[in-house]
Image (tube, helix red, strand yellow):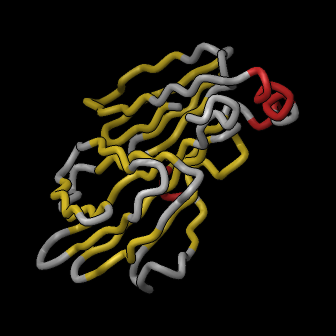
Amino acid sequence: ILFLCEGAAAFSVAGRAWNFARKAVFVPAPEQTADVKIVRTARLLEIRWALLPADRPELAAKAGQFPLAQAYADALQYRDPFKSEKTISRAILPHRLLPRFAMGSVETYADDLIGQHEHPLLDQFFFSFPENRMTLLIDDLRLPMGPDTLLHVPLGSNHGVSVTGDEVGHYLGIDFIPDPEKGN
């Protein structure tokens, strides 16, 4: 899973190419090689996700949906009940496209509070964009989160986000459903 955070890049698979000059996601078929050419100084986030034998039938049924190439601005926007009206949530890689994985984003500005909530089945990571300056709330902790930061939100923790003053909250939420057979 490749996410273009800034800059410009061309992604290619099997002779087809996709060019992006702003935030974008590119997902070749799992285990398929993709080429990346940086067109203008860029920052790229790469996420690797190990497949389980039980994931393969589900993935085979979706083979025609890859490669996925989408500009960030075109991602589906949605609302969550624990977020304010000014908060923009995006489904970048919806649940079930890749087995046990999803990726979305949250964007808001001060003063705002994303209420603390739990995901009892999700292990999450937050990756912040360059403009991000906010406070991540995890259980009883308040963690300042600046730009270009990757933080783990442990499975089942009570978490939220606070944005005050001139702060901006803008980050990816990277969701992993652990291997249920291994208990992790």
Q: Position of residue 180 (x, y in %)?
A: 67, 37
Q: Position of residue 145 (x, y in %)?
A: 20, 55
Relative to 16, is 153 above or below?
below
User: Which quadrant of the rendered structure holds the C terminus?
Assistant: top right
Left or right of residue 180: residue 57 = right
Asked which quadrant contains residue 16, the reply is top right
Q: Residue furthest left?
A: 165
Q: Position of residue 95 (x, y in %)?
A: 67, 51
Give the residue drawn at x 53%, y 31%. Answer: 1
Tally the marks: 0
Give the residue drawn at x 59%, y 23%. Answer: 50
Left or right of residue 168: residue 34 = right
Give the residue drawn at x 77%, y 37%. Answer: 65
Which of 23 and 16 lies nearest the eye of the viewer? 23
Which of 37 and 177 lies nearest the eye of the viewer? 177
Asked which quadrant contains residue 176, the reply is top right
Give the residue drawn at x 22%, y 79%. Answer: 110
Relative to 111, is 36 above or below?
above
Asked which quadrant contains residue 44, the reply is top left
Q: Where is residue 7 in the image (x, y as percent from the top left)?
A: 31, 38
